[in-house]
Structures are given as C-alpha cells and as structure tokens.
Amino acid sequence: MLNISWDEYNDLFYLAQEKGKFHLFIFDIKESRNGYDNKKIQKLRGSIIERIQNIESDLKIKILHLPEEKVRGERTGILGDLFSVIIIKDTIEAKDIYRIFREEKSILNIPYEFHYDDAFYETDDWILGNTMYYREYCISFLESRSKIKTNTI
C-alpha cells in the first residue's frame, strides 16, 4: 500500500476554500516542547465550545460541527498540543471565533501563546479524501502554515 502525505492533496485545499462546507480553526501551542498542561488545553477548548453552543441557542441556528467518524467515533479536536474548533461555513465570522478564543484564554488564565490559522474543508470521511478535501489533511496543512506565518495569540 502506498503511503500518501497530506501535502499531496494541496490542490484540493485551494478548491475547498470556495466549496468547503466546514470552517476549521486550529490553535497550536508555541514552543510546546517546553511543556504544557493538557488539562488546560481541554478546558480552553471546552469553554470555547460552550460559548459557541450558547450563541447557537441564542440565535437558534446550528453553528458547531462535531465530527463523527464511522470507524473512530467522535473526534475531540485535541491532538496533543494542538486543538481545533469546527463551525459550519457562513454561520459566524472567523473574527468571532478568534475573539471568543482570546476571551476564554484570558478568563482561564492560559499562559501559552498559540500559532493559529483557519480554512475550509469538505469532508470528514477519509474514504472521500482523494476527491474532496479531508479534515485531517486540512489540520496538517494549517498546522504547518501557521508556523510559517509566525502569528500567535
């Protein structure tokens, strides 16, 4: 079996920026090799999710997308020192997600700086990943790009 790298699908990344139905945000701890508290990361992601759920309730619309895979079940969005938040495209603006992130990070007194980035993707189904832009390829792309940009929050 041929092992294919996520970056071999970058052509799909660019197409997905127009037709992708999910808006993915990644937050990756800067200099995580110096150590970090995983419980703080879980708490931060949980508080961001809760805030978005409150907005959903207030606006009576579905905003959050919590991926469920046939084989692996629900994906938590936490990958070590990186976590993701996914919303349905065109429900709320990226600036709102980043504002919520900053506010919750401050409230929880999270001491870490995070590389961050966002983009659209098309599918949560790995089987479709050769014709539609797959979530985990997008996570890898954004993780790499966020470190090149060097912006942190």
Image (tube, rainbow, N blue to C red):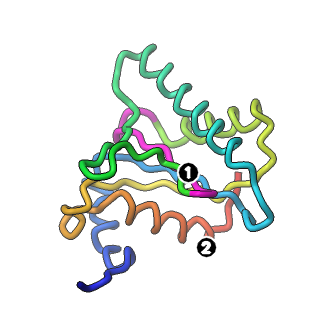
Write down the quadrant of residue 42 in the picture. top right
**Neighbour tally class for label 1: few under 14, some 14-19, many 20 plus, Cα within 10 Å:** many
**Residue at the spot 29% in from the left edge and 48% down from the top edge:** 69
**Residue at the spot 45% in from the left edge and 14% down from the top edge:** 58
Magenta residue check for 83: yes
For label 2, the residue is 148
For label 1, the residue is 83
Q: Is 138 located above or below residue 104 in the figure? A: below
Q: Secondary structure at mark 1?
A: strand
**Neighbour tally class for label 2: few under 14, some 14-19, many 20 plus, Cα within 10 Å:** few
Q: Is 22 located above or below residue 62 in the figure? A: below
The amino acid pointed to by label 1 is Phe
Quarter of the image with the N terminus is bottom left
Residue 15: percent from left, percent from top:
27, 64
**Residue at the spot 35% in from the left edge and 39% down from the top edge:** 88
Q: Secondary structure at mark 2?
A: helix
Q: Is 86 located above or below residue 1 in the figure? A: above
Magenta residue check for 47: no
Q: Is residue 106 left or right of residue 14?
A: right
Residue 123: percent from left, percent from top:
26, 53
Write down the quadrant of residue 98 in the picture. top right
Write down the quadrant of residue 74 in the picture. top left
Residue 109: percent from left, percent from top:
80, 37
Magenta residue span: 80-92
Q: Is 111 located above or below residue 35 in the figure? A: above
Query: Residue furthest toward the bottom?
Result: 2
The amino acid pointed to by label 2 is Ile
Q: Is residue 80 left or right of residue 91?
A: right
- Is 49 in front, or is 17? 49
**Residue at the spot 32% in from the left edge and 83% down from the top edge:** 3
* N-terminal label among 1 and 2: 1
